[in-house]
Image: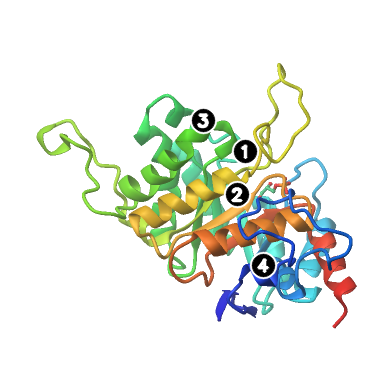
């Protein structure tokens, strides 16, 4: 048995728990079910998906105190509680009040959505969220600098958040997630991005110094013990990456996605396994829209991540919760 989230204990998620038609390696939203067979995922996998959900609303133009209260109510009143709500920084204090005693965590975002804020600004946003009682901080790393080869620049926002957390008096409870914006990276560099964060910044895996670093007097290791302590998830996407104007192809969950893709999630799992980061999990976010997507990503992570799965899987989504709840209800008790 493993516990995805302390509110819900799922059996060892196995392919059999999903639709009998679903090949364990099937990527989300290409699950094929035949009319003659019971279609759709099992009730237990649906409940596990809800228990792993960061119920999200990050819409500055429309989010209000009232919508935040409704989000918090939803998160604690479904068939099982969600793992967390993910709200804009200005709603953290309200969400903490609304969720007091529920066990549902409050997450927010910093350096969001672009990932280009100055380190001082990232520190300021982090300290503000911590002062409001946040439980989890999802920080966008400076992925543009990563694509330009500036590794320290890319990692700087993560360091800033981790060190603000470490310097607080709630540091033991606060979890940091890094949003890699995988859809903005070359698909074959998603692994490298994850490996850079885990190996160089957090020091997972042997010999975290690059070749020649010891002889290079100018080499500055990006290692951060605060990041090693507090970084607990690699997160795929902000969910706000715009399609390039020159390519208006409708968003799909493969290739043209601006959010999570199965290939990116598999690459993150491979990097986590390769450096032995057994306490780091994956948060799949950005474009998770259907029940099949949610349970399909749950299956990928549960079959690809080495070691215990407990607390190492999250879904960040603003538009799948109701579909998951309806799917549970259609299963009956
Ligand atoms: O986790 C954060 C994302 O904004 C959720 O993305 P989404 O709005 O595509 O579900």
For mark 3, give the secondary structure: loop
Q: Quadrant of residue 51?
A: bottom right
* CB atoms of marks 2 and 4 within 8 Å: no
Q: Quadrant of residue 241?
A: top right
Q: Which mark is residue 109?
A: 2
Give the distance between the C-alpha atoms of the residues marked 1 and 2, in whole angstroms: 8 Å
Q: Residue at the location (49% across, 46% down)?
A: 267
Give the distance between the C-alpha atoms of the residues marked 4 and 3, in whole angstroms: 38 Å
Q: Is residue 94 left or right of residue 218?
A: right
Q: Is mark 2 within 8 Å of ligand 1?
A: yes
Q: Earlier in the sequence, mark 1 or mark 3?
A: 1
User: Can you give x and y, in whole percent of width and height, for residue 47 in the image?
Assistant: 73, 72
Up-down relation of residue 330 to residue 234 (above or below): below
Q: Which mark is residue 96?
A: 4
Give the distance between the C-alpha atoms of the residues marked 4 and 1, in whole angstroms: 22 Å
Q: Nearer the viewer, mark 4 or mark 3?
A: 3
Q: Residue at the location (65% across, 50% down)?
A: 27
Up-down relation of residue 142 to residue 72 (above or below): above
């Amino acid at each position: 048995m493993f516990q995805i989230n302390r509110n819900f204990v799922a059996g060892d998620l196995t392919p059999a728990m999903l639709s009998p038609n679903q090949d364990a390696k099937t990527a989300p939203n290409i699950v094929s079910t035949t009319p003659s067979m019971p279609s759709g995922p099992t009730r237990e996998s649906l409940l596990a998906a809800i228990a792993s959900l960061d119920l999200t609303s990050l819409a500055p133009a429309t989010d209000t105190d009232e919508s935040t209260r409704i989000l918090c109510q939803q998160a604690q009143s479904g068939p099982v509680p969600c793992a967390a709500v993910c709200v804009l920084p200005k709603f953290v204090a309200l969400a903490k009040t609304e969720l007091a005693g529920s066990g549902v965590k409050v997450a927010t975002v910093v350096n969001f959505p672009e990932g280009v804020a100055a380190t001082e600004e990232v520190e300021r946003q982090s300290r503000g969220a911590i002062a409001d009682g946040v439980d989890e901080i999802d920080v966008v790393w400076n992925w543009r600098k990563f694509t330009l080869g500036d590794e320290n620049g890319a990692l700087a926002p993560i360091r800033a958040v981790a060190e603000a957390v470490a310097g607080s008096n709630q540091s033991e409870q606060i979890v940091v997630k890094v949003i890699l914006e995988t859809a903005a990276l070359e698909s074959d560099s998603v692994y490298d991005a994850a490996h850079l964060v885990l190996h160089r910044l957090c020091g997972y895996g042997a010999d975290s110094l690059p070749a020649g670093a010891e002889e290079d007097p100018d080499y500055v290791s990006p290692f951060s013990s605060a990041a090693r302590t507090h970084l607990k998830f690699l997160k795929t996407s902000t969910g706000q990456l715009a399609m390039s104007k020159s390519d208006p192809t409708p968003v799909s969950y493969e290739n043209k996605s601006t959010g999570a893709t199965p290939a990116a999630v598999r690459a993150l799992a491979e990097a986590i396994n390769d450096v032995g980061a057994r306490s780091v999990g994956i948060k799949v976010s950005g474009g998770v829209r259907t029940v099949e997507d949610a349970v399909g990503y749950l299956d990928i992570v549960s079959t690809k991540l080495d070691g215990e799965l407990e607390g190492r899987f999250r879904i960040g989504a603003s538009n799948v919760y109701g579909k998951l709840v309806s799917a549970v209800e259609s299963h009956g008790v």
